[in-house]
Image: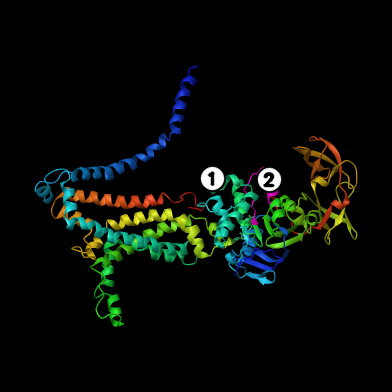
Amino acid sequence: MAAAPAVARPRISLRHRLAERGVDRTLLLLLPAVVFVVALFIYPFVYGLQLSFQPQAGSDAANKYGTGPFADYRLFFSDPYLRNTIWTTLKIGLPAALFNVLASVPIAYRMRGRFRGKRAVTTILVVPITLGTVLTAEGLLAFMGPTGWLNRILLDLGIVDHPVRLTHNYWGVVFSLVITGFPFAFLLTLSYLTGIDPTLERAAATLGAGWWQRFRHITLPLLAPGLAITFCLSFVLAFSVFPSAIMVGEPARQTRVISIAAFHAAFEQYDYSMASAIAMIMGAVELIVIGLVLGWRARLYKGATGGKG
Amino acid sequence: MSRSSTKISELRLDKVCREFGGVRALDGLDLTISGGEFVALLGPSGCGKSTALNCLAGLLPLTGGTITLDDRRIDGLQPEQRGFGMVFQNYALFPHMSVRSNIGFGLRMAKVPKADARRRVDEAIRLVQLEEHTDKFPGQLSGGQQQRVAIARAIVLEPPLVLMDEPLSNLDAKLRLEMRTEIKRIHQTLGLTTIYVTHDQEEALSLADRLVLLRQGRVQQIGSPEEVYTEPANRFVAGFMGYRNELGLPVSQVNEKTVVLDGLGGGLTGVRRDDLGARAVAAIRPEDFTVGDGPNATEVTVEVVEYQGREQAIQARTDDGVDLHLRADARLAPGDRVTVSVPPERVLVFAAESPAAPEEVA
Ligand SMILES: Nc1ncnc2c1ncn2[C@@H]1O[C@H](COP(=O)(O)OP(=O)(O)OP(=O)(O)O)[C@@H](O)[C@H]1O
Ligand SMILES: [Mg+2]
């Protein structure tokens, strides 16, 4: 009886000490997420990584560079047809992501307050998310194809003599990425913007700052870290472009993006090792771009922005 | 439109109105302020003080009336064209700028030459005693320090008008007193025309040259602190200015200046402030009661005693069952029976229908 408190005290204090370090029973709530991440992300990633170092016998890479661990990578970087897919993808993905972010800023800026019809406008801007790439691509073909409405109108109005080629090339893919990517960028930017305390701009106004100066000196610096994140997400979405590169692009040349190269290796040449290597390269390129953007972001102010966000 | 940092001679508000979806937050505010004056807008929460200030700063468009600054109409101007300094209730400091950049922001916008701007920022920093914190960011400052930055930022341009929206309401009691003195000192040093919003009557009384009392968007009284304190225009103002005892009593005798009410011992004589009906309300400050015999004497039983240092705040009940709030130097205990009295000139008698003050004033 008398010993009970003496036993109880160290047990409680151990629990307290663990809780101090964030170890308590709520940690179990993380379990499903951990299982999920391991099963669906880490395992396939590690599997693909090791596969990419085991060139398949009889494959192009093995024939040329032997069966050393880097044969697939050497082939990728020495064959311009493969290597150039990086630039092709960057040339499509970077401008599309940049456009989505930059275009979402003024629209979100205008829409952050409350006004009549805001919900309707937001819905219209966000609906393309629900369409999916394939539907968007079909719509693009019908609208902007050689015999689409746009060209017919332009021809009828006499603005052009020949149909303008806006699909089955570079522009078709960029348009499709803008249509599907813009809503994401817009929603993210809007939520970052509403997190900025509107009285900051009002204070700037009483100090003599016009609307552009208020945006330039107050809103933009506070929004920039959020824009960096928005850009990264938009870029990742755009970089893995596949369906639209095939459907509204020119998958043999102009829009032969890196995911097409990976698909080609995996499902036409049945060279899973090469496909894995391409996937790893794809991931590395994305990481480099994101790393650069986040490196820039690290130099920005990222503290509280005083808003409700 | 150039920003004038010169002193103004007159700011006139003429029937200024502001509606929010049919509800009048500000209803015909007439006010003339002369250069260098310190005016306090005082009233309970929701009475339209912030609305008035935002209308003046240009942050809210008017729905009626005009604002004239030295014979120039300014109610159509954007806030950046008016150039009034404003101290916001939540400070609204720019979180990504250092103290120095925050204070210098207005000068930068006005394209003041670097050296000149630097000198003026230094001066403002010295004025609010923030010399040690110039390179910190707002997130690294205490509430009182942030408050100082907000004030320095608003006054560094020496604006024709400084607007302050409850600048001390987020501070603790001690700091509030300190900053109050600070604001007074800054006003005396720079002589900037200031409009100060508060719901704390003590703050308003101690700072302002003139008080404007608002209730539901309407002016109740405009006057010097003494006038408002000793001669409140109506029951609402009286209640707001610390007349805690409001006794509803039947009228027994009405004279030209004075009135006698039934109740409180042998009848309560007071100053008539309204045309009276059958019943009236007598407003008396707790501190105007004295323990001991005198005019308007009545016997009470002490019920609750609060120790407040030199004085005691006492709640007592008359034999008729009327609760009285009073203050006493003498040590009293619950259950004591004492005689209290109050001079007739300190008893203000208002019509019973006169609008009342809110129950609780913060
Ligand atoms: N944007 C708005 N939309 C609708 N009603 C508003 C708006 N702003 C203020 N009001 C209303 O106008 C009235 C006055 O508000 P105001 O903010 O001026 O009060 P206040 O005197 O500053 O109060 P407090 O001391 O609590 O700050 C209130 O009843 C408020 O509900
Ligand atoms: Mg207010």
Residue at disc 2, secondary structure? helix
Front position in the image: A308 or B253: A308
Badge 1 amino acid? Gln
Which residue is label 2 attached to?
A: B178
Q: Residue at x 41, y 49 (%)?
A: A298
Q: Earlier in the sequence, mark 2 or mark 1?
A: 1
The magenta segment is: B164-183
The answer to whether B324 appears left or right of A165 in the picture is right
The quarter holding residue B86 reads: bottom right
Looking at the picture, which amino acid does disc 2 mark? Answer: Glu
Q: Secondary structure at mark 1?
A: helix
Viewer-proximal residue, A66 or B239? A66
Q: Answer yes or no: disc 2 within 8 Å of ligand 1.
A: no
**Is residue B312 visible in the rendered structure shown here?**
yes
The residue nearer to you, when weighing A20 against B177, is B177
Disc 2 and disc 1: Cα gap in Å? 20 Å
Numbered label attached to residue B140: 1
Instruction: Pinpoint the chain carrying mark 1.
Output: B
Location of residue B322 in the rendering, given as x and y in whole percent from the top left corner: 80, 46
Seen from the viewer's position, the closer of residues B342 and B66 is B66
Q: Is residue B66 above or below residue B318?
A: below
Instruction: Specify whether residue B88 is in view.
Output: no
- Image position, residue B201 (x, y; %): 72, 52
Assess whether residue B167 is covered by the magenta stretch.
yes
